[in-house]
Amino acid sequence: MRSVRLALAEKGVAHTLVGVDLVKGEHLEGQHLARHPWGKMPAFEHDGNAFYEASAIMRYIDEVFPGPALTPSTPVERARMNQVMSIVESYGYPASITDIFIPRVLVPSLGGQTDEALVEAAKPRAALFLKEIARLLGAGSYFGGASVSLADLHLLPVLTYLRATPEGQALLAATPTIEAWMGRMNERSSVQAVMPAN
């Protein structure tokens, strides 16, 4: 959800954020299920149109609203942006969030115990994710070329939450180019407005 909010902030779009309490199970109630049949977030409505899935919403925001373009202008850079967004969704989020952040941080905050085997098994997948992301960034400043793209905004929340774990801190320390990229991203006003304090 934060990636969508980052896109809105980068474009300067005024919007209303509707809270859904996951702990209370509001994401599985009829009102939210009407917006997203799998009970996930985010869900987005604009001008009579409703969408879910963060990458689809982000692309819509970039196309519909004025402001700086968040999609690169060349076919190669656009393909790289789309590739990174897909890597985040298919590999990065499951390893970093579902299998490390949630059991390490969220479950204990709700009174549960960390599944240490799950976290341990996820570490090699998270390491591969970071290694490949670092390779794709190369010596570039951003994943879309010279300026921030949807890929950067899609990746940052995942890495921010991963960094909130001891495992994530160690993994990120092994990828200094990604650490430097996170530093650049965290200087952006959109990130300071949307992301939790590190």
Image (cartoon, rainbow, N blue to C red):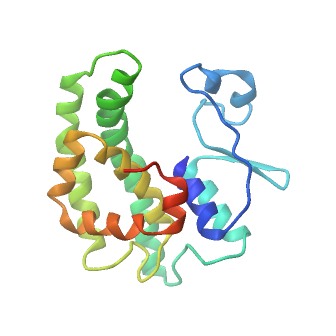
Pick the front one: 56 or 192: 192
Q: Is residue 55 visible?
A: no
- Judged left or right of residue 66, residue 108 is left
Q: Position of residue 133 (x, y in %)?
A: 29, 62
- Quarter of the view holding residue 38: top right
Taking 62 as reference, is 54 above or below it?
Answer: above
Which residue: 66% across, 36% down? 19
Residue drawn 63% across and 55% down? 57
Identify whether 165 is placed above or below 135. above
In this figure, what is the number of numbered marks? 0
Residue sitting at the far front: 197
Residue 17, given in percent of the width and then of the height, sits at: 69, 45
- Residue at x 55% of width, y 74% of height: 71
Q: Would residue 183 be visible to someone looking at this image?
A: yes
Tell me residue 67's x, y (percent): 67, 76
Q: Is residue 168 above or below residue 156?
A: above
How far across and how far down the image is residue 70, in percent?
56, 73
For this rendering, which residue is in front, 166 or 82?
A: 166
Q: Residue at x 39, y 53 (%)?
A: 88
The answer to whether 86 is drawn above or below residue 90 in the figure is below
